[in-house]
Image (tube, rainbow, N blue to C red):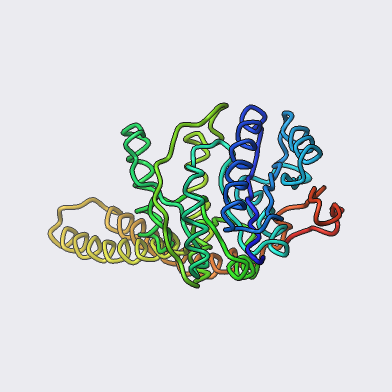
Amino acid sequence: MRNKLYMVIPCYNEQEVLPETSKRLKEKLSTLVKAGKIDPESRIIFVNDGSKDRTWEIIRRLHEEDPVFGGVNLSRNRGHQNALLAGLMTVKDHADMAISMDADLQDDINAIDEMVEKYLNGTDIVYGVRSSRAKDTFFKKATAEGFYKLMNTMGVNTVFNHADYRLMSKRALEGLAEFREVNLFLRGIVPMIGYSTDVVYYERGERFAGESKYPLGKMLSFAIEGITSLSTKPIRMITFLGFFIFLVSIGILIYSLVRHFMGATIVGWTTLMVSVWAIGGLILLSLGVVGEYIGKIYLETKARPRFLIEEFLNDTENAKKPEEKTER
């Protein structure tokens, strides 16, 4: 059977939720295997993103007790996006399809059935999309929806109300491997892959246990990372601002000259005003032009490893040593 599914679950300090998460995911995997939808060799892979608690200890124990569970242990904390990519790139040679989701059980695991069904019908990428935000506070709903609108305005193609709950075929995973950005924003990169796509709507629940790993500060940082890693529009806006201020400086020049010849000014005022506005406009204009090039260079020249894998637990393969799984 050639429908081997690998579930990839990034984990950072998730010792409180892992026992329940592993139980529910195993039940879902067993149901799909019994229904003949996926291969019996399908696996659940937890990615430990440098956790400071017992997360990796629990993952190792789960693997020892049941081969359906596997683990990827990163050498240190690399952030959610890098951890997710590490898991996907590690399993892409073993899986026919991979589903990524968070460990906190907020994503409805029952949506997996429909995702797999769409894959079997020929879809390469299936996005899990929230059907509503009725349970969110007004602030959370406004900021989240504003985030997606801002991203699209800035030229970053995202799926509205989609996080990182998605299914990707082997072909889509191989396509993702071709993207070499160090500054990762997978919600914007995955739509760039192309291929056939579809969506599955689900109701997002409350976190099962523990605390959110994305407070407001991290969410703002995440948004900035997404915009700056996939769009040069902010830099282009500086260019437009430079043009605007330069035009304003011309207006100020005309105004100052008129006031000068009318004798309604003091000595040196005209020169000072024109100099401040003209030079300010020219500086912003110059920064914008230079910034256009710096922005493009910035997106291409960084070549630091995106993650280093210390250990890979998977019964179908021997554990990989760190040097064997260094992703750039």
Circle count: 0
Of all residues, the one furthest to the left in this rendering is 262
In which image quadrant can residue 284 be found?
bottom left
Q: Position of residue 99 (x, y in %)?
A: 58, 54
In which image quadrant can residue 90 be found?
bottom right
The answer to whether residue 142 is above or below residue 82 is above
The answer to whether residue 65 is above or below residue 67 is above
Q: Is residue 309 left or right of residue 125?
A: right
Q: Is residue 286 left or right of residue 134?
A: right
Residue at 47% in and 42% down: 108
Residue at 84% in and 54% down: 320
Give whichever of 203, 218 is nearer the camera: 203
Give whichever of 242, 213 is nearer the camera: 213
Q: Position of residue 98 (x, y in %)?
A: 61, 57
Q: Position of residue 210 (x, y in %)?
A: 57, 26
Residue at 72% in and 28% down: 53
Residue at 67% in and 65% down: 1
> In which quadrant of the rendered image does the C terminus lie?
bottom right
Q: Position of residue 308 (x, y in %)?
A: 77, 52
Give whichever of 41, 239 is nearer the camera: 41
In which image quadrant can residue 27 be found?
top right
